[in-house]
Amino acid sequence: MINMDPKKNPMPCQDPGVRAKNFDEVALGYDEKTALDEAQRCLQCKNPACVSGCPVNIQIPQFIKKICEGDCEGAYRIIRETSSLPAVCGRVCPQETQCEAKCVRDIKGEPVGIGRLERYVADRHNACGGASVEAPAPNGHKVAVIGSGPSGLTCAGDLAAKGYAVTVFEALHTAGGVLVYGIPEFRLPKAIVSREVENLKAMGVKVETNMVIGKTLTVDELFEMGFEAVFIGSGAGLPGFMGIPGESAKGVFSANEFLTRSNLMKAYRETPTTPIMKGGNVAVVGGGNVAMDAARTALRLGAEKVYIVYRRSMQELPARHEEVEHAQEEGIEFLLLNNPIEILAHQNPDDPRDSKNGFVRAIRCIRMELGEPDERGRRRPVPVPGSEFTLDVDTVVMAIGTSPNPLIKSTTEGLEVNRWGGIVVDEETGATSRKGVFAGGDAVTGAATVISAMGAGKIAAKAIDEYLSK
């Protein structure tokens, strides 16, 4: 039976006043009744445009049909045919601009809640102890994967399924890449990431942590160890700063450091080994998903007031609508059409950590207005003369983007990179200028989405299989 309700079923969430004080997951997920009702909104199109909107081409109508038939495990198997991380993607993928943006129900109402149904299926599988993953028969080939983020895990999973002996080399002490250090617990519980990694290990994938490729080992040494192909999925971990006066003051963080201290090093605990901040006011500069994550994390760490400072308007804000909405519900203030021009600091002679740089006490901003479109079609923000103002804050988080770490390119001969530091690849295969070396995800594109990185990992895995099968 088709459900012709024009609106998708809302996602149950923690109350904003409660969740702003804890790190528990905000979105609570569909129950069985709600999932069935939402699944019945799918029209089961003969030529489903939604599938073309998914970077990993999940067969969306097929898995939704299985939900309608009461076969949740069957739905999970369909998703797993093309996605290695269904519980992750159901939570953090921007479905509203991808698969759901192409749903025909979106023409005269709201699209089917594809992401919410994917999460339901994955969570149901995990909760019910679905069929375990088994290692396939080995094919005798060895592949090294650098980085255990979404592109690396996807590439590793696809290759392991074909019998390759895959070893993933992760620089940090925990596998998961940006999924563990970059995305907060309240959006993506780390137990879910850990489970997905364990599934890959069950398929025979080896994971070596604390391995900084370019330092601990080089790409050349990986080949000397018997690996026949290498996939670089090292992400974009080099933070960007504005270059304004005062950025070296204590209390100024990159979003990478701020989120890593909280997510991976557990700075929210009573006695953290890597503390970040204690109360006070926080300004987060930027308007993407990372800025939302940093602002909402600061609130949960005890900030009295949190500001998002963004130089464009709400219309240009790149963060997901859901994340912006959640941030607003939690009381975060958006200072739009504003741009920082200086960070002001003060000296504290009673604090032994103090130095000439001082501690953040305020941030000076200037109001902006939108002018002519830039090269990407967005109206360029321009300063309004004489509109400067000062915002009293104790912590500033710069969430203005990241670029690929130069370590691998600087230690690997013959690896071509572009002017932004991204590895140059063949778009159809992920092949680099170095024979046997492939790359994908943020290491190529700069900071992008989890699902686009997964798509790149799939493309490279297919190309590596063809390369080693010749």
Image (spheres, rainbow, N blue to C red):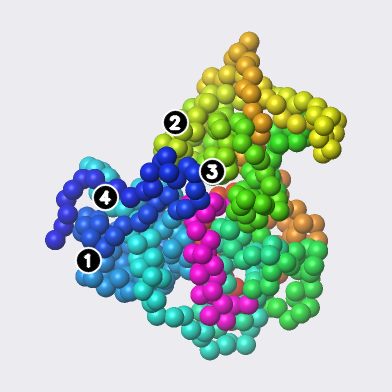
Residue 201, quarter of the rendered image? bottom right
Tag 4: amino acid: Asn
Which percent across, then down, holds residue 285? 60, 33
Residue positioned 54% across, 43% down in the render: 300
Q: Is residue 56 visible?
A: no
Disc 2 on helix, strand or loop? helix
Tag 3: amino acid: Arg
Contact, mark 2 vs mark 3 (Cβ under 8 Å): no
Instruction: Specify the quadrant that holds the C terminus.
Output: bottom right
Q: Closer to the camera: disc 4 or disc 3? A: 3
Task: Give the Cα separation between the discs numbered 1 and 2.
Answer: 37 Å
Q: Which residues are magenta?
A: 182-206
Name the residue beneath numbered marker 4.
9
> Which badge, 4 or 1, is on the more N-terminal residue?
4
> Which badge, 1 or 2, is on the more N-terminal residue?
1
Furthest residue toward top: 386
Does residue 113 appear left or right of residue 390 in this picture?
left
Which percent across, then down, holds residue 134? 48, 84
Furthest residue toward left: 1
Q: Which class describes the residues within 10 Å of circle 4: few (<14), some (14-19), or many (20+)?
A: some
Q: Is residue 340 above or below residue 420?
A: above
Tag 1: amino acid: Cys
Query: Which of the labelled discs sits on residue 68, or is there none?
Result: 1
Query: Which of the labelled discs sits on residue 315, or is there none?
Result: 2
Query: Which of the labelled discs sits on residue 300, or is there none?
Result: 3
